[in-house]
Amino acid sequence: MSRDPKDSIAPTPRERELMMLIARGMQNKNIAYELKISENTVRAHIGNIMRKYRLQNRTQIAIIFALHAAPPSLRRDLANGRGYAKTTAPA
């Protein structure tokens, strides 16, 4: 079984910072203000992240960030399909 190429690619510190702000739900103009860069630079970073990880939208960026930020045990559980606790239906 081959590994997913997304697992072997590590984000740069700046990409990680940007991904974290996207995961917080921030808009490009707010990210630009926070990082003291232009909105065009934010868009360029987002485009680079999407190409690097072969993503299609900001939600996927947030998911990738969460998986990289998660502890190894949680990542392992998610990879093995054990990420969700079973719940019982309400009575």
Image (cartoon, rainbow, N blue to C red):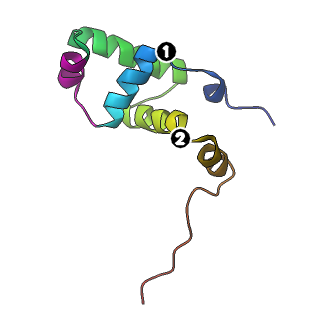
Give the left or right position of residue 76, taking residue 20 as reference.
right
Residue 64 image offset from top left, x and y in percent: 49, 34
The residue located at (47%, 38%) in the rendering is 66
Residue 45 image offset from top left, x and y in percent: 37, 14
* Magenta stretch, overall SS: helix
Q: Quadrant of the N terminus?
A: top right
Give the left or right position of residue 70, taking residue 8 as reference.
left
Write down the region rendered in magenta. 25-34
User: In terms of sequence position, does the residue under pointer 2 or pointer 1 come before the other?
Assistant: 1
User: What label does residue 91 carry, if any?
Assistant: none
Find residue 50 and report its image quarter.
Answer: top left
**Vertical arrangement, residue 39 with respect to residue 83, above or below:** above
The residue located at (68%, 31%) in the rendering is 4
Give the left or right position of residue 16, taking residue 41 as reference.
right
Find residue 30 and report its image quarter.
Answer: top left
Q: Please tell me whether residue 30 belongs to the stretch shown in magenta.
A: yes
Mark 1 sits on what residue?
A: 12
**CA–CA distance in space, label 2 to label 1:** 17 Å
| Category of crowding for the residue at label 1, using alpha-carbon neighbours closer than 10 angstroms: few (below 14), some (14–19), many (at least 20) | few
Label 1 sits on a secondary structure element that is loop
Mark 2 sits on what residue?
A: 70
Find residue 25 and report its image quarter.
Answer: top left
Instruction: Give the amino acid type for the residue marked by disc 2 in the picture.
Output: Ala
Residue 47 image offset from top left, x and y in percent: 39, 16
The residue located at (73%, 32%) in the rendering is 3
Instruction: Give the amino acid type for the residue marked by disc 1 in the picture.
Output: Thr
Q: Quadrant of the C terminus?
A: bottom left
Residue 32 image offset from top left, x and y in percent: 22, 16
